[in-house]
Image (spheres, rainbow, N blue to C red):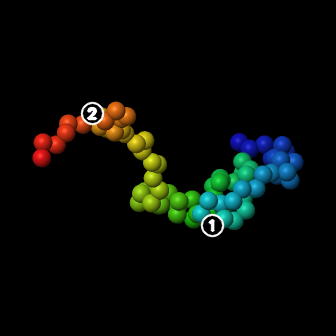
Amino acid sequence: MIDKSSTSSATRTSLKVDCPTCGKKVPWIQENEFRPFCSKRCQMIDLGAWASEEYRIPEAEEKDKWSEAGDDRPKDAH
């Protein structure tokens, strides 16, 4: 449960962040159930982008055994 007596002073000095979807300024307060988004709509747009793989976390590049320094690849017999 939220203690409203302690949040009134926090609301006046709250940090404002940009909604990642639309850019609207949003107060970073406990009462904002959609933070960092401004609304449920923006939250769902972002979730949909992740679900459709529009956003991706890059994988670490794997080096194969031939890309190391001191290239020991077999020479072509051609």
On the picture, is 31 further left or further right than 8?
A: left
Q: Secondary structure at mark 2?
A: loop
Q: In this orientation, which residue lies closer to the viewer: 2 or 14?
A: 14
Residue at the (47%, 56%) spot, across then down = 55
Total tally of numbered discs in the picture: 2
Alpha carbons under labels 1 and 2: distance apart = 52 Å
Q: Residue 8, can we see it?
A: no
Going by the image, does 10 lie left or right of 2?
Answer: right
Residue 1 sits in quarter: top right
Most extreme residue toward the front is 78
Q: Quadrant of residue 39?
A: bottom right
Q: Residue at x 74, y 44 (%)?
A: 2
> Does label 1 or label 2 sit earlier along the sequence?
1
Residue 56, image x and y in percent?
Answer: 45, 53
Image side of residue 56 versus residue 38, left or right? left
Which is more toward the observer, 55 or 33? 55
Residue in the image at 34% along x and 39% along y: 67
Residue 4 vertical position relative to residue 40 in the rendered view, above or below = above
Q: Is residue 45 left or right of residue 39?
A: left
Question: Residue at horizontal 45%, vertical 48%?
Answer: 58
Residues 71 and 29: in front is: 71
Q: Nearer the viewer, mark 1 or mark 2?
A: 2
Q: Residues within 10 Å of mark 2 (few under 14, many from 20)?
A: few
Percent x, y of residue 75: 19, 39
Kind of residue at badge 1: Cys
What residue is shown with label 2? 72
Q: Is residue 55 visible?
A: yes
- Residue 66 appears at what percent x and percent y? 29, 37
Q: Secondary structure at mark 1?
A: loop
* Residue at the disc numbered 1: 22
Question: What type is the residue that disc 2 sits on?
Answer: Asp
Rendering quarter of residue 41: bottom right
